[in-house]
Image (cartoon, rainbow, N blue to C red):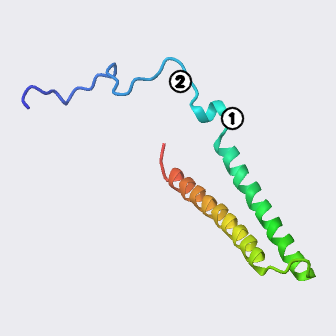
């Protein structure tokens, strides 16, 4: 280790090479899929599931639907969709919290 000089740092030496131009978009960017689009899709699916559960409950209460099994399935789908939405929100809040702790 006697041959190493760790006391002098040369600013011209870069560990990470910066690209001269922007990289080509990945498959998700080419297809139009984005994080915002994915979140929007999850929200829309949760709304659809909630409306389907509400409709199934109303139909059952009105006597138009005899099978309670379908009502329970629709309610569970809505519950799962809402649970997914809440977990995504919680993850985003945790990520924001971690990022806000980084000092620049």
Q: Which residue is mark 1?
A: 32
Which residue is drawn at the image coordinates 72% and 50% (left, top)? 41
For this view, does 67 lie left or right of residue 32?
Answer: right
Secondary structure found at label 1? loop
Task: Say above or below: 101 vs 27.
Answer: below
Task: Say above or below: 92 vs 19.
Answer: below
Which residue is drawn at the image coordinates 78% and 76% (left, top)? 71
Q: Which residue is mark 2?
A: 23
Percent position of residue 65, x then y: 87, 77
Which residue is drawn at the image coordinates 86% and 70% (left, top)? 55
Which residue is drawn at the image coordinates 73% and 50% (left, top)? 40
For this view, does 94 lie left or right of residue 51?
Answer: left
Which image quarter: residue 59?
bottom right
Q: Dot 2: within a 10 Å radius of its alpha carbon, few (fewer than 14), some, or many (20 or more) residues?
A: few
Q: Nearer the viewer, residue 22 or 65?
A: 65
Percent position of residue 72, x then y: 73, 77
Q: Nearer the viewer, residue 41 or 7?
A: 41
Percent position of residue 18, x then y: 44, 23
Q: Nearer the viewer, residue 78 or 74?
A: 74
């Amino acid at each position: 280790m006697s041959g190493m000089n760790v006391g002098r740092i040369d600013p011209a030496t870069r560990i990470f090479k910066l690209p001269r131009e922007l990289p080509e978009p990945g498959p998700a960017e080419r297809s139009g899929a984005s994080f915002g689009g994915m979140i929007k899709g999850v929200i829309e699916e949760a709304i659809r599931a909630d409306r389907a559960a509400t409709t199934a409950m109303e139909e059952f209460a009105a006597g138009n639907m005899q099978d309670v099994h379908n009502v329970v399935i629709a309610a569970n789908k809505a519950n799962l969709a809402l649970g997914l939405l809440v977990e995504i929100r919680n993850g985003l809040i945790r990520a924001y919290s971690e990022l806000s702790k980084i000092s620049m």
